[in-house]
Amino acid sequence: MYELIQVSDRSYYIQCPAKIGLVRLNDTDVCLIDSGNDKDAGRKVRQILDSNNWRLTAIYNTHSNADHIGGNKYLQGQTGCKIFAPGIECDFTQHPILEPSFLYGGYPCKELRHKFLMAQESNVEYLTREVVPEGFEIIDLPGHFFDMVGFRTPDDVIYLADCLSSRETLDKYQVGFIYDVEAYIKTLEMVKTLKAKMFVPAHAQVTENISELAQYNIDKVQEIAERIVALCKEPAYFEMILSKLFTEYALNMNFEQYVLVGSTVRSYLAWLKDTGRVSAISENNMLLWKQI
């Protein structure tokens, strides 16, 4: 874990729960793509930097989920590097309480205010095309989270953040977190068409061809959507739908999973309602979802 792996002349990744990208800008300066899940991750990154006599100039966050920004504060404090994040992700990174609050839909209780859902705040600036190193391309990857992006490096390596999951992860957990289902599918359809020397997803194996895995993720989204529609054959309230989905997929519910999967199911229901596959009706002061 936390092994530095080179994938091309200037592009690397650090093997950890959410892969950290590292790109050499010259003989001494490097930048990171994300920073890991906590202060300990930051320390391990710093050890890699020191052992190679590299100077960290900037961290480019793909999005604001805690497992991607958790090392920000430590590394910024140690190196003075700048940190950039796209759009709304910049605000979430500056104010990490927004992530568990958004997921829960209100003030998050203690079980949700921990490092896996709420990183330490860091001093971050908005990501624009003017602030990335020369030759870098920002790739918009909305869907998993609000304004998530990926990056193509000058030596043609693409870092894909959380826009897809490995087959093993999908087969085990089934319901991956999604904020905007329509945008997520559009992103994956775009990713299927990309060509690069190498693709580095945060939660899947590095590969030269991403198309097949992108399609597998699309198919899983469509499968879950069909299940949710089927669960609405008779009018059902949200908690009933969520409970049956957990049961059918043999998932184990705890408070964190209730919030993460529950938020995702609400996103599916919103998409299914907008596309005319389910409707929402009020009955006996309950909101019920019904297949159309």
Image (spheres, grey):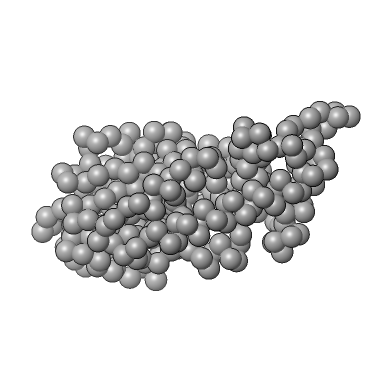
The structure residue drawn at horizontal position 49% and vertical position 44%, both measured from the top left corner, is 184
| Residue farthest toward the right in the current orientation of the protein | 284
Which quadrant of the figure contains the C terminus? top right
The structure residue drawn at horizontal position 31% and vertical position 65%, both measured from the top left corner, is 208
Residue sitting nearer the eye, 195 or 75: 195
Which quadrant of the figure contains the N terminus? bottom left
Q: Position of residue 178 (x, y in %)?
A: 55, 46
Quick check: 241 above or below 19? above
Residue sitting nearer the eye, 55 or 21: 21
Q: Position of residue 277 (x, y in %)?
A: 68, 38
The answer to which image quadrant residue 53 occupies is bottom left
Classify residue 12 as left or right of residue 68.
left
The structure residue drawn at horizontal position 39% and vertical position 53%, both measured from the top left corner, is 192
Q: Position of residue 226 (x, y in %)?
A: 67, 50
Classify residue 292 as left or right of residue 260.
right
Quick check: 285 above or below 272? above
Classify residue 140 as left or right of residue 115.
left
Classify residue 27 as left or right of residue 272.
left
The answer to which image quadrant residue 220 occupies is bottom right
Q: How many marks?
A: 0
Q: Is residue 75 visible?
A: no
Residue sitting nearer the eye, 130 or 83: 130
Q: Is residue 53 visible?
A: yes
Q: Position of residue 231 (x, y in %)?
A: 76, 48
The structure residue drawn at horizontal position 24% and vertical position 67%, both measured from the top left corner, is 6
